[in-house]
């Protein structure tokens, strides 16, 4: 295991203070903590039930599993290797038990804001607060700026409520006094409503006190004024952008984008305010009265610099979102073009805050288990059994055990689609249903009783902000080996979709190693140790290092067996610590960024274009020959279909096993209109097929590429479109196929090097349970690639 940094250690143990290391100018930016993994005191939120996550989601045999657990009820815990029988809990191999564990609940601490340890202390007789703000949906009063801890230490607060009223409080630093609070008329700020599309827009907000009168200006226009001749004394509490204190803890978190926040020790004039409004947040104010100004130019990381002489540097609590541009930015950039954020002088800088931001639960480690040195690679689970609501329930925490570092590599490597498991992890704090088999949709299941954060790459934040990043130190119950997606079809597309392959390989004597997507991201050259690599299930989310690792492997003569659909579709990146995954989805169904704000699709982790891999310069078809066609209805058995043989004389159908197939034969289904069936729920085709299906002209700047040479079509998939589903052209625009065109099965000897068998659908491993001919085909492919069963 790699040596942990001090920061990682503190996050794992859940105690202590993480110290900023950005140089002497940052000293003093950290507050004393309340023993919650380096957080300043923060409003807690209880999460009833039993929830857990491993410190690392994949470990080598011989390393130690660390489980972070919160439990409001007693539980039994078993560490298990998933057994040699698919969907059979009785076959789970119990390796360790922790019985009769007492409750040990730990809260979570959602909500992002900028924490400034060096709070305001200068004597002031006038004051101005300026920023650009773009509110999202606001359901209750939220803080924009505060040096304020209600009810006992109240100096300054600027807030907004659901009616768009601005609350401006000044006080003597002691107890809250109602005469220090003034509230502007309704709709002073435009605040989007919860129903319908969120119509967000930037607004310039200035709050001024000249020693006698308080005024509020929005977009250069005075909208409220009150007489107030009190005295401002500063309470000894932190300065916060996007939060205010309540009973000693950060609370009242803001759902808004902010840009160019600043505080002055004088009253700006109306003319100065109009000039600042006209500047659109592009120019840092040059003013000797600045008490603090944060241009937010960093665009990554957790620190923000104060450019005033006072060096009130800030720390972003719970991440926030960078790379969204400022009020001057026209985010409607061309889909196909040469836009470069670094060259855009009008882009400006903004930071997105959310009241439900959470990327690390910061729970302590409660259980550890030393993985045996000789443990077999595969999927393992921490299986929690507990009673909630007088009903027995199970919570499965899935993790991967890789081969020991002291053992030689197997001939075959299986890539687990862990990025996709995480992408669909809506409602991570839900109470699991009583049944072990549970249907999870893209929005998850019923959320936990305290309405904890529930967002994923398929579900927006509670206030409507699209989800652009997720934390890995969070529960992911959706990765349970018993989670369904299709209900009556018993179809799955996450961890359970991969299990039939693992079981089949073991039953047939094939030795294999397994890694996670993140393992490949960290170490792209590890593929070189293997004769063949299997991509299985729903491997949709790829990073550039993953892509480059696969490209170099193939160019070096590597061999890929793709039993996945919707493969290499969305681009992701990770922060340096590997604790946050970022994905900026745009221009395809499920997008979290609308096309008119495409300029927000550039990643904060690496500054590069996000969205579809093929539109980021890393098309899947260049490596594995196919691209996404669409999806069917995973709940309708009649919407699934088989493969129809096109090239029955190809060697993969004939040797070493003769599958005795003829052109037009159907394979990969339990029966017409029955499941398991191979073409579902997502499937891929050649780009030439997408071109034939296209029904609109190419979009400006867009062009459908030609098939690379050498691809052979082995079988054509069937999807009964009349039963439902959605098909798309190369530019992800809806099409209506005139036939039952489904995914395509291909074999490709690449001119650039390497060989590929691509079945182009998520359901291949699942359908092997129903059709021995799919199993025979896989045996032939493995043999063709030099992979043989090993005797016991």
Image (cartoon, rainbow, N blue to C red):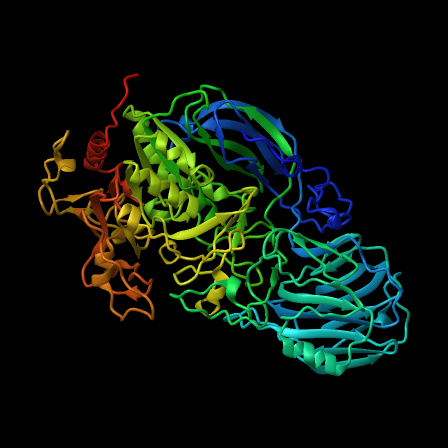
Residue at image point 40% right, 33% down: 526
The number of callouts visible is 0
Residue at screen point 30% across, 40% down = 555
Give the x, y percent position of residue 551: 34, 43
Looking at the image, residue 736 sits to the left or right of residue 302; the answer is: left
In the displayed image of the protein, which residue is found farthest to the top?
A: 792
- Closest to the observer: 72 or 343? 343
**Along the line of sight, which residue is nearer the eye, 334 or 518?**
334
- Please name whichever residue, 627 or 313, is drawn nearer the observer in this view of the structure: 313
Q: Determine whether 86 is above or below 39 in the image.
A: above
Q: Give the quadrant of the C terminus.
A: top left
Residue 250 seen in this snapshot = yes
Q: Nearer the viewer, residue 101 or 621?
A: 621
What residue is at 81 percent from the left and 75 percent from the top? 267
Point out the image quarter for the N terminus.
top right
Q: In the rendered view, does 216 fall on the left or right side of 403?
A: right
Return the x and y of residue 215 as percentages of the image width and height: 78, 78
Give the image location of residue 528, x and y in percent. Answer: 35, 32
The picture places residue 545, in percent across and down from the top left corner, at: 43, 44
Q: Is residue 457 left or right of residue 630?
A: right
| Quarter where residue 763 is shown | top left
Visible in this render: residue 141? Answer: no
């Amino acid at each position: 295991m790699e040596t942990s940094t001090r920061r990682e250690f503190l996050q794992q143990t859940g105690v202590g203070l993480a110290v900023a290391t950005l140089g002497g100018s940052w000293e003093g930016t950290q507050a004393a903590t309340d023993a919650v993994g380096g957080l300043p005191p923060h409003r807690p939120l209880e999460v009833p039930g039993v929830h857990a996550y491993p410190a690392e989601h994949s470990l080598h045999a011989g390393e130690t599993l660390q489980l972070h657990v919160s439990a409001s009820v007693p539980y039994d815990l078993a560490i298990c290797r998933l057994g040699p029988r698919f969907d059979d809990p009785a076959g789970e191999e119990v390796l360790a038990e922790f019985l009769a564990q007492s409750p040990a609940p730990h809260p979570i601490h959602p909500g992002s804001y900028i924490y400034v340890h060096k709070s305001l202390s200068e004597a002031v007789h006038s004051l101005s607060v300026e920023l650009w703000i773009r509110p999202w949906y606001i359901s209750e009063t939220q803080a924009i700026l505060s040096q304020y801890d209600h009810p006992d230490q109240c100096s300054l607060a600027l807030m907004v409520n659901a009616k768009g009223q601005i609350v401006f409080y000044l006080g003597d630093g002691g107890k809250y006094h109602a005469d220090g609070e003034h509230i502007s008329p309704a709709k002073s700020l435009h605040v989007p409503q919860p129903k319908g599309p969120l119509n967000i827009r930037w607004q310039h907000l200035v709050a001024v006190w000249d020693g006698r009168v308080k005024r509020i200006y929005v977009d250069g226009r005075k909208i409220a004024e009150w007489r107030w001749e009190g005295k401002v004394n500063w309470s000894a509490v932190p300065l916060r952008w996007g939060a205010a204190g309540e009973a000693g803890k950060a609370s009242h978190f803001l759902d808004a984008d902010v840009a160019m926040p600043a505080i002055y020790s004088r009253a700006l004039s109306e003319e100065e305010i109009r000039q600042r409004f006209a500047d659109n947040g592009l120019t840092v104010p040059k003013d000797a009265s600045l008490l603090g100004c944060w241009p937010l130019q960093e665009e990554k990381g957790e620190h923000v610099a104060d450019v005033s002489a006072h060096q009130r540097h800030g720390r972003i609590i719970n991440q926030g979102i960078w790379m969204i541009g400022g009020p001057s930015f026209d985010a409607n950039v061309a889909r196909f073009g040469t836009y470069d954020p670094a060259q855009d002088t009008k882009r400006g800088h903004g930071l997105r805050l959310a009241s439900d931001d959470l990327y690390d639960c910061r729970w302590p480690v409660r259980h550890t288990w030393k993985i045996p040195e000789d443990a077999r690679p595969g999927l393992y689970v921490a299986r929690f059994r507990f009673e909630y609501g007088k009903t027995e329930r199970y919570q499965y925490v899935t993790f991967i055990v890789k081969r020991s570092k002291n053992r030689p590599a197997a001939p075959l490597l299986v890539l687990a689609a862990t990025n996709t498991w995480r992408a669909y992890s809506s409602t991570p704090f839900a109470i699991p249903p009583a049944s072990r088999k549970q249907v999870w949709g893209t929005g998850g299941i019923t959320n936990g009783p305290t309405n904890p954060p529930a967002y994923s790459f398929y579900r927006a934040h509670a206030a409507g902000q699209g989800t652009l990043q997720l934390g890995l130190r969070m529960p992911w119950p959706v990765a349970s080996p018993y989670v369904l997606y299709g209900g009556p079809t018993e179809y799955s597309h996450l961890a359970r979709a991969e299990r039939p392959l693992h079981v089949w390989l073991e039953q047939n004597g094939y030795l294999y190693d397994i890694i996670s997507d993140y393992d490949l991201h960290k170490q792209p050259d590890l593929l070189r140790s293997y004769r063949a690599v299997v991509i299985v299930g729903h491997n949709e989310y790829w990073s550039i290092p993953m892509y480059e690792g696969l490209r170099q492997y193939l160019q070096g003569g590597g061999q890929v067996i793709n039993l996945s659909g919707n493969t290499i579709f969305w681009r992701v990146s990770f922060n340096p610590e590997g604790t946050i995954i970022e994905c900026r989805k745009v221009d395809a169904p499920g997008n979290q960024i609308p096309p008119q704000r495409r300029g927000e699709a550039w990643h904060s982790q690496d500054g590069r274009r996000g969205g579809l891999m093929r539109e980021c310069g890393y098309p899947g078809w260049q490596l594995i020959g196919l691209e996404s066609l669409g999806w069917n209805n995973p709940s309708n058995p009649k919407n699934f279909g088989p493969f129809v043989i096109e090239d029955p004389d190809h060697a993969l159908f004939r040797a070493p096993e003769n599958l005795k197939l003829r052109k037009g034969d159907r394979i990969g289904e339990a029966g017409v209109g029955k499941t398991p069936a191979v073409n579902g729920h997502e499937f891929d085709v050649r780009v030439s097929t997408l071109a034939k299906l296209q029904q609109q002209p190419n979009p400006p700047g867009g062009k459908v590429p030609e098939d690379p040479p050498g691809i052979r079509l082995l079988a054509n998939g069937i999807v009964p479109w009349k039963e439902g589903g959605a098909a798309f052209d190369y530019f992800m625009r809806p099409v209506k196929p005139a036939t039952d065109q489904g995914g395509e099965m291909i074999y490709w000897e690449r001119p650039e090097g390497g060989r590929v068998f691509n079945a182009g659908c998520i359901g291949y491993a699942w359908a092997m349970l129903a059709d021995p001919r799919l199993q025979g085909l896989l045996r032939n492919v493995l043999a063709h690639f030099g992979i043989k069963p090993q005797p016991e």
